[in-house]
Structure formats: structure tokens, C-alpha cells
Image (spheres, coloured by chain):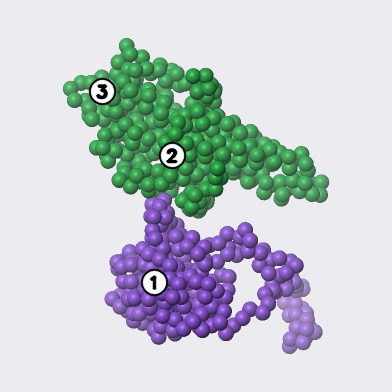
Amino acid sequence: MNIIVCIKQVPDTTEVKIDPVTNTLIRQGVPSIVNPFDKNALETALQLKEQHGGKVTVLSMGPAQAKEALKECLSMGADEAVLVSDRAFGGADTLATSYTLAAAVRKLGHFDLIICGKQAIDGDTAQVGPEMAEHLGIAQLTYVCKLEVNGSTVRAQREHEECHEVVEGQFPMVVTVVKTINEPRYSSCKGVLRALRSNIQTLTAQDLAVDETKLGLKGSPTQVRKIFSPSKRTDGVKIQKATARESVSELMQKLADAKIV
Amino acid sequence: MQFELSEENKMIQKLARQVAETYIAPSVQERDEEERFDRALFDKVASYGFQGIHYQDQYGGSGGDYLSYIIATEEIARVDVSLCIAIGGGGLGGFPIHSYGTEEQKQKYLRPLVEGTALGGFALTEPGAGSDASAQQTTAVLEGDQWVINGSKCFISNYADIYLVIAVTDRSKGLKGLSCFIVEKDTPGFTMGKKEHKMGLRSAVTTEIILQDVRVPKANLLGKEGEAFKYCMQTLDVGRIGCAAQALGIAQAALEHSIKYAKERCQFGKPIAANQGVSFMLADMATKVEAARLLTYQAAWLKQNGRPYGKQAAMAKKFTTDIAMEVTTDAVQIFGGYGYSREYPVEKLMRDAKVHQIFEGTNQIQRIVIAGNLLK
């Protein structure tokens, strides 16, 4: 089974602070990590490889620095790593990113499954995986919390807010996974040393069969105008009268005053 | 001069921290209270390969730097030095087998130690032979194609699977009459004696070992007959860097706990860190920890680059273990009454730090080693 796992290097948002003056993220000095959901995707791929054999390739688009993230994936057990990196890709929104990644996937050749995390913790769009499936013209199963493969049939449980949906599909397809699917493994000392000895293949725009107008900032229909942090919600009010009836009537009064009812 | 850790060092550091915080940290206090060594936990941590980072692939290692091993030791000790003793046991037992063993001995005994499927022990100390290793009473006599070992050892770390036992093979030759043997724990006549109840390192096992007509094959003599003292001294030289790394991890933990607590604990309407008396203590603690780290890493760097490192190893051991005692004592002071309570982590760090000034050659012995290097 040939599995491609798409990963993104993101700032560790637990350590990101917002500049109170400019209202932008202070990224300086903030460590970069592999997007946590992508680690779930990699773990899913590694488990499938352990069960069925095959190869796991990790793929990322980003600056040269993203090699660090790819090395971490190699140290966890991925067989190969490919970085798609070029100035021409800079400023890409999800459409241009998914277009570029899909071109890289075509370049890599045969695959059975592409597994992505459901979304990246910095952009939170959850669009790149599904868009890749569209560019490649293959099926997609999103928000997967359980995945089984039998031959070329994929059986997945999709996590919705109020139910789980069980669906089946055939190779090749794109699967995006949620956090509950597994607990990503740590690497090992052997894995770290193996990763450091591995070569990471780099693909540039020239290596890919792409329409240059669809790359980077030029190929991005969405542009970021402003980034701001939402205003903090004030504390709630607890209504606790002597009886439930009194509490309810107080609540109704407050709702009426706020013109909600 | 470069003061940047390599990519490998950083990745191992991150891995060791993750593993230590995820698997070791949750039960630290409980295991300390119960004086319980958890073999399953050791197996789990050892499966990541920290004990064998610096050994070659052919012996089950990762082929990494010695400094990576030292950094992993520091990280594990930062969370629980008792477990670190078991991880380091592979080093104390592994180093002499790797350095002086035959290929067959390496495959049979070094590989499991490096892979972490076996625990190693180093049995040198005897009730009458502590700092003076020459006063050994344990004997080994060759009978046919077997060595017969008799004697007892004390303060031996770990319920190990593979021990290196030092014994007298020719008393007339003094230090040159000592030899080293590989002994498996299940060999008839080999028994564990009294378990020590200690001030610190409570979840690391320290026992007496009794050898009564223990017979090992001739092939279990390590290296050459009569050379064990040299092997021991070289093993202890390396061990000192590991010992310094352990003390460094303890000191680092004490410093981190102290900074956090000093910022949170309010008295007289402000955090105690706002008092210069406290903040200056933190500044001194941090300076000591940094200096100790440089000395320890330098010793590791010298070793991994094939340079003489005995003096630096002794300096790192002496200095780091001394400052670990000071820093942990200051941490208890900063925590005040809570520092003295077992509910908070710093009193354990102080208890754990103390033995580092004593074992692997007391800090008085380290001064002899350092002075010897200066005056030769």
C-alpha cells in the first residue's frame, strides 16, 4: 500500500502570543511543530503500513525550514519525505496550496491513499485535504475517526457533532482524520538517527507540471485583510432563585430585556 | 567555538523530554513513597533506546553522539533520577563490555543492554572496599574451564540481569590481581541480599549481592586477567559524566520549580519573586546550573571526540553534584514550609541530589583525580 501523508509545519499555538499593539501574532521565538492533526494522519498511515505493508511518504509545502517537520515524521517511521518549496508558492491560500500539493502528488506517481489531518491549527480552514481530492479527481472521506482497509476498500467512521457515520470507498482516495483516531507515537533514538541520515527530496515549481498563474499569491483568490483576536466574552450570570419557577421567570425577563425572545 | 546543540542533540533532547514527561512523571511521587522500582516502566522508556544512543548499529544502538546520551540522561533525571539509574546501568555495564569484550561477549551481553531488554549492574563496591577499590575480598578461582566466584558486594544498583563482578584472581599482585567477570543473575549461587532503604533514589534498587560458589564459563572473563582495576577506573571516568548529567537534571528541575513557585506564591501582597532576596537566589541557582551544564557537555564532547577526558569528567562530576546539592537546598528554602513537605517536588530533589556527591567516586576522590591530573 502506498500512502502519502500531507503535513504542515505550524507555530506551536500554545506558545503564540498576540502583539497588543499591532494585533498580529508574535511568531518570533515561537517553536515550530508538526501540525498535531497531521501527526494523527501519520500515525494512521504507519499503522496501516504495519498491518498491510507498503510505503509511507510524507509531503509538505513550505519554506526550507519545514524540513525539520519532515525529519520529525521520518523519525516516527515514515519511509520518505518530500518538500515542495519555491518562492513562487509564497502567499498561497488553500486553493493554491492544494493545487500545488496535488501536482506534487502526481509527480510522485502511484498512490493508494492520501491522508491529511482534518485541519491545521494555525489556519483552521480544513480545506486543503478536500481540495486536493478535487484537483486529483478522486474521492474524499473527511473527519475520519476510525479507518480500516480491506484490499482496496476503505471503511471509515466519520465523526460528526451528534453522530458517527460509517462509509466505504475505494482506492485511491483522500482521507482527513480527527484527533480521536489514535495517539501519535513518539519517535525513537534509532528513528531520530535514521531521519538525520535520510535525504529529503525537494521539488520546486519547475519540477511540477503546473500553471504558474495558479501558484502562490497570484493563484490565491482569498487574501488576508486583517487579523484580530475576538473580543473576550464576559463572564456569564448564574440565576439561582429559591425555586425553579422564580429562576425561570427571572431568566425569561433577562432574555426579554435583551430582546432575544 | 560553537555553543549550539546539533540537530541530533536537539531531537534527542525533545524526545527524551516527551517520553520522560509522558511516561515517567505521572508515577514519580508514588514510586518514591513506595520505594518501588517499576520494571515495566523501565522497559517502556528503554524501548526508545536512550541507553544505547551512542552505541553502533551492530550492537543494537543508534549510532549517535555521546553528548546525545548525556542530554537524554539529563532530561530523564530532570523528571526522575531513580529511573535514570536503571537507564544508566546499561552504560556502566555496557561500557566495559564494549571496550574490552570479545565480539561474542558483545553480541551476547552488550546487545541486550544496549537494546534495553536487559538491565546492567556493576559490582565493584564491597563493605570494606569503597573508595579503596583495592581492598577487594571477593575471589575468583579457575577450576577447569570455569571460574568459581565467592564473596559479597554492596550498594549495587538495579535488580540487573547482567552484572560485571570484580574479584581477586591473584592477591599477591594487589591492584593488578583484580579481574572482571560477566555474571548472569540466574547463575546458581548468585543471590540478592539486603535491599537498602535510602534517603533518596528511593525507587531505584540498591542491594547487596552474595556470590557463593558461582560458576561462570572461562569465556566470561572480561578482557585480560589482572586488568580489572584499569577497566574500573576507565568505566568510572565515563560514569562520572553520566553522574554529572543526572545531577544536572536534578538541579535543572529544582530551578524550574523554584522559578514557577516564586512567581506564583504571594506574601505581603506580592509574589515572593518580587523580593530581591528571592530573585537573587534564583539568579545564583541559574548561573550554577548553566556553568555545570557547560562543564558536563564539555566532558561529553571530549569523550565523543576521542580526547582525554578524565580530568574534565571528574571536574564535571564534582562541580555539578555539588551545585545540585546547593540548588536543591535553595529550592526547598524558596518553597518554605511547603518545600519541606512531600506534597511538593523539591524535597525529593534534595534527597536525590545528595548521593551524587558520594557515588561514582566521592567528591573528595574527584579532587584527588583532578589534582593528580594537575600535578603529574
Q: Which chain is purple?
A: A
Relative to A133, residue B211 above or below: above
Which secondary structure lies at badge 2?
helix
B167 sits left or right of B335 in the view: left
Q: Are marks 2 and 1 on the same chain?
A: no
* Residue in the foreground of this view, choosing between A103 and B243: A103
Relative to A87, residue B317 above or below: above
Q: Position of residue B197 (x, y in %)?
A: 49, 31
Residue at image mark 1: A4
Mark earlier in primary sequence (2, 3): 3
- Indicate the chain on which mark 3 is placed: B
Residue at image mark 2: B304
Crowding near the residue tagged with mark 2, few <14, some 14–19, many ≥20 C-alpha atoms within 10 Å = some
Question: In the picture, residue B79 is in which quadrant?
Answer: top right
Quote the CA–CA distance across marks 2 and 1: 38 Å
Asked if residue B281 can be seen in this view, the reply is yes
Q: Position of residue B55 (x, y in %)?
A: 37, 43
Hey, what amino acid is under mark 3? Val
Asked if residue A183 can be seen in this view, the reply is no
- Indicate the chain on which mark 2 is placed: B
Q: Position of residue B360 (x, y in %)?
A: 47, 29
Could you tell me how many numbered marks the image carries?
3
Chain B: its colour in the image is green
Crowding near the residue tagged with mark 3, few <14, some 14–19, many ≥20 C-alpha atoms within 10 Å = some
Which secondary structure lies at badge 3?
strand
Quote the CA–CA distance across marks 1 and 3: 60 Å
Which mark, by number, is residue B148?
Answer: 3
What quarter of the picture does the N terminus of chain B occupy? top right
User: Mark 2 or mark 3: which is in front?
Assistant: 2
